[in-house]
Image (cartoon, rainbow, N blue to C red):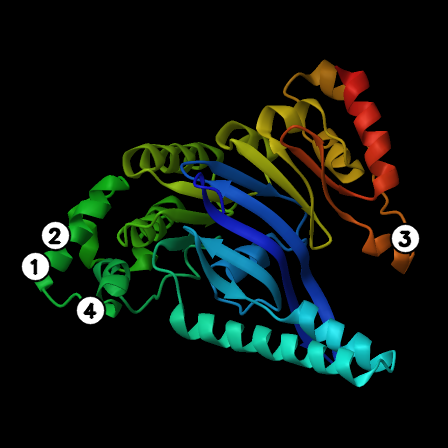
Amino acid sequence: MSSEEILRVEGLRQYFRDDKKWIKAVDDVSFSVKKGEIVGIVGESGCGKTTTARSIIKLYKPTGGKVWFNGELISAGAWDERMALEKAKSEKSDKQRISEAKEKYRKAEALSKELNKKYPSVTEIQMIFQDPMASLNPRMTIKEIIAEGLRIHGEKNEEVIRSKVYDVLKKVGLMPDHANRYPHEFSGGQRQRIGIARAIIMKPKVIIADEPVSALDVSIQAQVINLLGQLRDEMGLTILFIAHDLSVVKYFSDRIGVMYFGHMVEMAESEELFAHPLHGYTKALLSAIPLPDPYTEKRRRRIFYERPTYTPEEEEKFKLREIYPGHFVRCTEAEEKDMRSERENAQ
């Protein structure tokens, strides 16, 4: 990791077992986040955005890949080593090659278990969930919900807990009197503020906001977005912002990553991505943004993207390639040349 990076994800894979086959929810996702930066992640429902976030904060144990936080390796999977061992066995390789593959797989598994024991969770990375009501215990008061993290980490002084809870309630635009109420007594926007308060009371360095405004009215969305921006400035937060609304992501994010079919297919600075999309899916996604002018909207041309069929050999050649400084696209070597030409002609 460079000194500027606070979070780095490399080759992240999250697979789930179903009826003796693997379901690939997230496959070979790589990106990094700099300190103080807001990185937006967009893509259609089911593309793996939330699964990526949950794997980073260790709600899911990653199947493969590595995650670094603040310069330290916090999680690792052993999928690549497992596949190498299976390949060596299937090809009936010599005993030495199989033995070496077994040893690499054993070391990778040992590292994964060691990291899970050393970092069962990472307090300095907190998550704001999409559905505030589903993520708040209806039987607990707001004070109990927000203070739960403090208690888990050993804080027993009730006066200190009360003071910290009141302080974060004020920060998110709620009143100290709200501490003794229950989640069902609040509106959707207020409940999301409670979720934000629960995250920031642990004084995190990174906030993962998983579609925090998707269930809210437009006016309330703006309030929550502005609150997150304000907290970023006050607390020096780094934010990984997951959303469907591309206009919100463009307004709020420094860089944007586009996910499709479990892959990170394109990543660039916000202005660069909107001005010069290169991947076919990104172009289709941006063409779907409605325009406020009815005359322009009537002439808007939608782009439809159909995922091409690739051979297994071509699939293996896919990787994130830097087409333009800071602008990465997941493509083959042949596609890279075409995209470079397209980007140069756009200048």
Check disc 3 and give the amino acid type: Tyr
Place residue 265 in its image quadrant.
top right
User: Which residue has dot 1 on it?
Assistant: 159
Dot 3 or dot 1, earlier in sequence: 1
Query: Contact, CB < 8 Å: mark 1 with mark 2?
Result: yes
Per the model, the C-alpha gap separating discs 4 and 2 is 16 Å
Task: Using the numbered discs, state the Cα–Cα distance from disc 3 to disc 4 in whole angstroms.
Answer: 53 Å
Reply above or below: 220 against 103.
Answer: above
Residue type for callout 2: Ser
Q: Are marks 3 and 4 in contact (CB under 8 Å)?
A: no
Q: Nearer the viewer, mark 3 or mark 1?
A: 3
**Neighbour tally class for label 3: few under 14, some 14-19, many 20 plus, Cα within 10 Å:** few
Residue 334: which quarter of the image? Answer: top right
Q: Which amino acid does label 4 sit on?
A: Gly
Which comes before the other along the chain, label 4 or label 2?
4
Q: In this view, does 215 lie above or below 347?
A: below
Foreground mark, 2 or 3, reads 3
Q: Distance between the residues labelled 2 and 3?
A: 58 Å
Dot 1 lies on which element? helix
Q: Position of residue 28 (x, y in %)?
A: 68, 56
Q: Which type of secondary structure does the marked residue at label 2 adopt?
A: helix
Kindly identify which numbered label has been placed on residue 310: 3
From mark 1 to mark 2, how far is it between C-alphas?
Answer: 6 Å
The residue labelled by disc 2 is 163
Q: Tag 4 or tag 1, which sits nearer the N-term? A: 4
Q: Mark 4 points at which residue?
A: 154
Left or right for 127, reference 61: left
